[in-house]
Image (tube, rainbow, N blue to C red):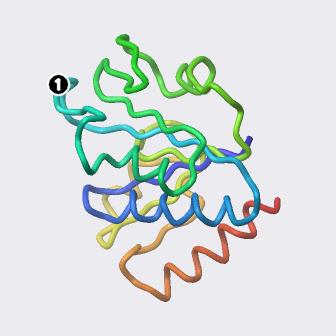
Amino acid sequence: MKILQIVGYKNSGKTTLINELIKECRSQQLTVSTIKHHGHGADEISLNHKEVDSLTFINSGAKESIVLGKQLIERVTYEEKSLQQIIDEDLSVEPDVLLIEGFKHDHFPKVLLTKQSEDLAQTLQNIVYQFDAFNLEEKKDFIVWFENWLKK
């Protein structure tokens, strides 16, 4: 299973990019799962919302999508777990690709999305690619990098 984290500040384009990466994986007949961290309280996320990021991932072709916030894992269980525990215990299938949104300080390879990257980049480890998701040329270059990463 290939694992890639997409990290950055709020509104840096993480969810939009993950939806594009899911579609790219699916075009290559790869299965994808997603795990998303959100910083809201447990009572602030629900699959009843019309525009839930985890549902957009499913609509883009992800096999499953898990959301973790505080102690709520939307899938649904109620206990606090680390990202590694979720990967080890909660994925119902082992996908070809696991895309993770957030969890900035975990150890997996990271793509950092941000316009003002200096302060965040200095606090993170294992950044394998960094770009501004709103810069179309940089985004095109990243997609080429991602396609090559999938083949490794």
Give the side of residue 124 with respect to residue 70, left or right. right
**Element at label 1:** helix
* Residue 78 image offset from top left, x and y in percent: 35, 12
Q: Residue at x 63, y 25 (%)?
A: 92
Q: In front here: 79 or 77? A: 77
Q: Residue at x 82, y 59 (%)?
A: 152
Q: Does 125 sit above or below residue 68?
A: below
Q: Residue at x 25, y 56 (%)?
A: 10
Q: Does 45 sit above or below residue 78?
A: below
* Residue 65 image offset from top left, x and y in percent: 49, 38
Q: Residue at x 44, y 86 (%)?
A: 136
Quarter holding residue 11: bottom left
Q: Quadrant of the N terminus?
A: top right
Pointer 1: what residue?
43
Q: Does 84 sit above or below residue 147?
A: above
* Residue 46 image offset from top left, x and y in percent: 26, 32
**Residue farthest along the right direction in this orientation:** 152
Q: In front here: 33 or 60? A: 60
